[in-house]
């Protein structure tokens, strides 16, 4: 028969799936011999059954009764026993912590009789007993019976007047209990349930139900916690922090979760119960002060915190209660921390001999590193906080507030920095979002349109700043306290914290970027962080198998990429080399009506191209540089069809412009992304690719040590590649230059015929942006704004396939191509150069798929290095445990 209930002595910390985080860790502490009140855990499996079937699984009630009976005999009293009651708490606890999202009820077992028994237990402390009773009705009423909590709070406030809750007398609290019972009767039409077992049963079901409470659902969606895990329920013997001044309750961290510093961090509240300490009902005191109040408990707590750190080998946060001088542990878990603290704590723990460098590397993530690399607001000077919204997309942005997409585009066009402020954004705002430095909305969460699109663009965004009254028609918003911000007023938004400031807060480079740039000056305040990052990066580099290259098109980008640790360029685009003044030459190329005219245009372009490549080769020294021959549709280099038509219609066009209009019309495409691009263009315009290859060869001859690799885009059939390759090989041979010739794999057909293509290619580079578009059959530019937020909401995918490589679909094509390509040519080099190359999850995929390197934008290189190291470790640990 299925087992649905585990005593704390039966569980352990590795059973989080089954017992939830709270239950697993309560069991772990129990087995460590720490003072945990006895209790048991009802599994998440029971919850899943209950939620699916609408009824508790068979046998569960008997099993609970059995565990309750053992608890009662261990404690020597029965639940709610009139003269000497056992009381329990019924606490939620899912696998992943969801702070404050679900429910807990304390003091179960109290009623009009047992309240007297409780007073007797506490040496005749009537006040304490009635305080506990009123808390039970309050929590039970709100959580289990669904009564608006304000009703109870209001009654309490009325009674207190300006006094503290601790100043209420036993009689007053007894009166409050009567009032509360009245509220229950009025709101539910029934009396507050006096039967302790019924109280417990109803509370357990309420905890199960709270899994699907709207705020819990919302939280899970935002944190990407699966919706079907369910919660466990913990039934714990009560201990009391509200028995008087020798009692109290507190929370603590074993070290500072903000900085990682070791020390005593926490808050304590004397004569209080449960949530009081975080609910702000009275002022808490710093944990250090407990030493003065109760040295014995304090010392014991310090010893326990050290035990926990040593045992979990990580920062822990804890909840504890002191009942008349006796310390009890009520919760612990490995605590959340900031990105900076994650790096610092990891290396501190290595220095303390608690973990190895391998483990330190598993304790930090590429996302955390990326967070540390964003520019941030300096702390100098005055900062006037307007409000705080959700931290939807990190970064620090300063600009003039604008309230419509049109104004954003207009002002940005005049060189102004703007922040687009909207209630919420929709696809029509896209142009404004692109033009803005940052985006601020008053509605919507982390999966709102604004948030999703901003993250996709890497743009700073604060969303759901609900305190703001945004009125687009009047071009202004109002912040709390009546502060009004009108169009043109400068604001600063922090996408890492969600803060919104009035005026310009100065932005500074992150110390971690300074470090990668070799510019960090060793100032003390950031020194420990920088050293921690340095150590962990070195370790990641020594652990990784994947190479890391950069997508860089200019000598400046190339140089930065090298400073950030790139081992080559994996994608050097050549498109930009045909823009600006050189457009003229492209126009000539397109208009050429004879071979001589065309060759003249190409001859004019060649020396310019050559110089471009010389610059990049110089920046990269003897590291490989993969150059992609020209890729995008030709019309992108030509004048706009509408502008030209208007000019021609008005009779203002020159002869050349009239001929251009014909060409532009001829080249116009319905679906340019699926049109005349890449190798297709190279085959249609004779001499274009040859010119580029010659420029590469000539440049390589001038830069000793240069290692060019020539990459042909958009190949779908080996025949395309063979034609280009033959011509290129001849040019290289004539110039006496050695270069690999390979291809992008970005058309599904190329992946599916990789065995043939590898016969003609020395390397493959997966262009996963196009490969994703073509595999899914949607164009990124169109769909991200049109329906991605809806798809994410509906759970069609958990994350955009343009952000994280879709393992099942696109990933399968990559694996097929890698395998069949290597079969045909064992020394085939494999890399990826889509934006996925800098995404943590996707880097792990590339490692698993056996690629040789990932290539990504210069700023993502450290992230890719770190994650490549983590991927190698994950593989090692996997095989260790097998
Ligand atoms: P959350 O998950 O929201 O932290 P908890 O289940 O931890 O909720 O409980 C809420 C509060 O009640 C916490 O402060 C906890 O320490 C306290 N608490 C829970 N169970 C007991 C108990 N058996 N005795 C005393 N205090 C308890
Ligand atoms: Mg808790
Ligand atoms: Mg492409």
Image (cartoon, rainbow, N blue to C red):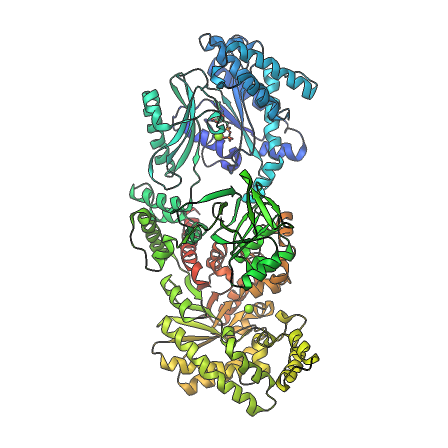
Does 476 appear above or below 836?
above
Give whichever of 263, 658 is nearer the camera. Answer: 658
Residue 864: quadrant of the picture: bottom left
Q: Quadrant of the N terminus?
A: top right
Residue 413 place in picture, x, y as percent: 55, 64
Q: Could one spot residue 300 in this view of the protein?
A: no
Q: Position of residue 330 (x, y in %)?
A: 45, 26
- Image position of 741 with respect to 526: above or below: below
Give whichever of 56, 389 is nearer the camera: 389
**Within the image, what quadrant is residue 375 found in?**
bottom left
Residue 625 percent location from the top left of the image: 42, 72
Q: Decide which of 106, 9 is in the foreground and name it.
A: 106
Number of callouts in the render? 0
The residue positioned 32% from the left and 22% from the top of the image is 292
Asked whether residue 569 is in view, the answer is: yes
Is 616 on the left or on the right of 83, as rendered? left
* Quadrant in the rendering for residue 509: bottom left
User: Is residue 873 left or right of 765 when viewed as pictured?
Assistant: left
> Does residue 457 appear to the left or right of 545 in the view shown?
right
């Amino acid at each position: 028969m299925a087992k649905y209930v585990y005593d704390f002595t039966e569980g352990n910390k590795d059973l989080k799936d089954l017992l939830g985080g709270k239950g697993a860790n309560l069991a772990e502490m129990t087995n460590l011999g720490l003072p945990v009140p006895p209790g048991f855990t009802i599994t998440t499996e029971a919850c899943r059954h209950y939620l699916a079937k609408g009824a508790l699984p068979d046998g569960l009630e008997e099993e609970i009764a059995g565990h309750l009976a053992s608890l009662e005999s261990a404690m020597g009293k029965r639940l709610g026993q009139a003269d000497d009651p056992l009381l329990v708490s019924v606490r939620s606890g899912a696998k992943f912590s969801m702070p404050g999202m679900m429910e807990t009820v304390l003091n179960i077992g109290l009623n009009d009789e047992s309240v007297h028994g409780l007073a007797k237990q506490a040496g005749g402390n009537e006040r304490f007993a009635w305080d506990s009773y009123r808390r039970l009705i309050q929590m039970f009423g709100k959580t289990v019976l669904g009564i608006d909590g304000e009703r109870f709070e209001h009654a309490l406030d009325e009674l207190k007047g300006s006094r503290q809750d601790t100043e209420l007398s036993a009689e007053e609290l007894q009166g409050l209990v009567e009032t509360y019972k009245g509220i229950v009767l009025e709101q539910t039409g029934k009396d507050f349930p006096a039967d302790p077992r019924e109280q417990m049963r109803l509370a357990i079901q309420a905890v199960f139900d709270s899994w699907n409470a709207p705020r819990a659902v919302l939280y899970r969606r935002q944190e990407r916690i699966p919706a079907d895990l369910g919660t466990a329920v913990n039934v714990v013997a009560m201990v009391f922090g509200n028995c008087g001044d020798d009692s109290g309750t507190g929370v603590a961290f074993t070290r500072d979760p903000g900085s990682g510093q070791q020390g005593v961090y926490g808050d304590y509240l004397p004569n209080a119960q449960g949530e009081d300490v975080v609910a702000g009902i009275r002022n808490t005191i710093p944990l250090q002060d407990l030493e003065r109040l109760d040295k014995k408990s304090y010392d014991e707590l310090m010893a326990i915190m050290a035990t926990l750190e040593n045992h979990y080998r990580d920062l822990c946060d804890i909840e504890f209660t002191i009942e008349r001088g006796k310390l009890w542990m009520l919760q612990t878990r490995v605590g959340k921390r900031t990105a900076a603290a994650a790096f610092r704590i990891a290396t501190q723990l290595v220095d303390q001999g608690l973990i190895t460098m391998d483990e330190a590397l598993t304790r930090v993530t590429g996302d955390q590193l990326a967070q540390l690399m964003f520019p941030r607001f300096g702390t100098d000077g005055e900062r006037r906080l307007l409000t705080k919204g959700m931290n939807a997309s990190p970064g620090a942005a300063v600009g003039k507030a604008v309230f419509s997409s049109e104004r954003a585009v207009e002002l940005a066009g005049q060189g102004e920095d703007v922040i687009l402020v909207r209630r919420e954004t929709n696809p029509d705002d896209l142009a404004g979002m692109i033009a803005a430095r940052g985006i601020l909305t008053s509605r919507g969460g982390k999966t709102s349109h604004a948030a999703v699109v901003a993250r996709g663009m890497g743009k700073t965004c604060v969303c759901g700043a609900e305190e703001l009254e945004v009125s687009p028609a009047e071009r202004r918003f109002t912040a709390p306290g009546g502060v009004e911000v009108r169009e043109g007023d400068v604001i600063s938004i922090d996408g890492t914290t969600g803060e919104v400031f009035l005026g310009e807060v100065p932005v500074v480079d992150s110390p971690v970027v300074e470090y990668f740039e070799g510019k960090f000056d060793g100032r003390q305040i950031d020194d420990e962080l920088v050293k921690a990052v340095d150590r962990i990066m070195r370790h990641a580099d020594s652990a990784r198998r994947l190479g890391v290259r950069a997508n860089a098109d200019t000598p400046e980008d190339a140089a930065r990429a090298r400073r950030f640790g790139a081992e080559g360029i994996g994608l050097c685009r050549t498109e930009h080399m045909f823009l600006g003044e050189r457009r003229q030459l492209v126009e000539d190329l397109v208009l050429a009506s004879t071979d001589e005219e065309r060759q003249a245009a190409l001859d004019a372009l060649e020396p310019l191209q050559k110089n471009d490549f010389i610059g990049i080769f110089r920046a990269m020294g003897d590291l490989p540089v993969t150059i992609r021959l020209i890729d995008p549709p030709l019309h992108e280099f030509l004048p706009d069809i509408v502008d030209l038509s208007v000019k021609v219609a008005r009779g203002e066009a020159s002869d050349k412009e009239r001929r251009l209009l014909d060409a532009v019309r001829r080249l116009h495409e319905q679906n340019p992304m699926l049109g005349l691009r890449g190798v297709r263009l190279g085959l249609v315009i004779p001499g274009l690719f040859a010119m580029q290859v010659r420029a590469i060869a000539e440049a390589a001859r001038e830069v000793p040590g240069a290692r060019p690799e020539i990459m042909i885009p958009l190949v779908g059939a080996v025949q395309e590649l063979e034609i280009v390759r033959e011509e290129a090989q001849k040019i290289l041979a004539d110039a006496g230059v050695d270069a690999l010739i390979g291809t992008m794999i970005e058309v599904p057909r190329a992946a599916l015929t990789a065995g043939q293509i590898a016969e003609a290619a020395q390397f493959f580079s997966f262009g996963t942006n196009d490969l994703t578009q073509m595999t899914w059959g949607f164009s990124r530019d169109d769909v991200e704004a049109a329906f991605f937020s809806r798809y994410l909401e509906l759970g069609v995918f958990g994350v955009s396939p343009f952000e994280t490589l879709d393992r099942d679909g696109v990933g399968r094509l990559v694996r097929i191509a890698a395998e069949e390509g290597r079969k045909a040519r064992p020394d085939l080099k494999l890399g990826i150069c889509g934006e996925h190359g800098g995404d943590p999850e996707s880097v792990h995929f590339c490692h698993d798929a056996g690629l040789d390197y990932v290539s990504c934008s210069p700023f993502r290189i450290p992230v890719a290095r770190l994650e490549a190291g983590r991927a190698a470790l994950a593989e090692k640990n996997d095989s260790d445990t097998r």
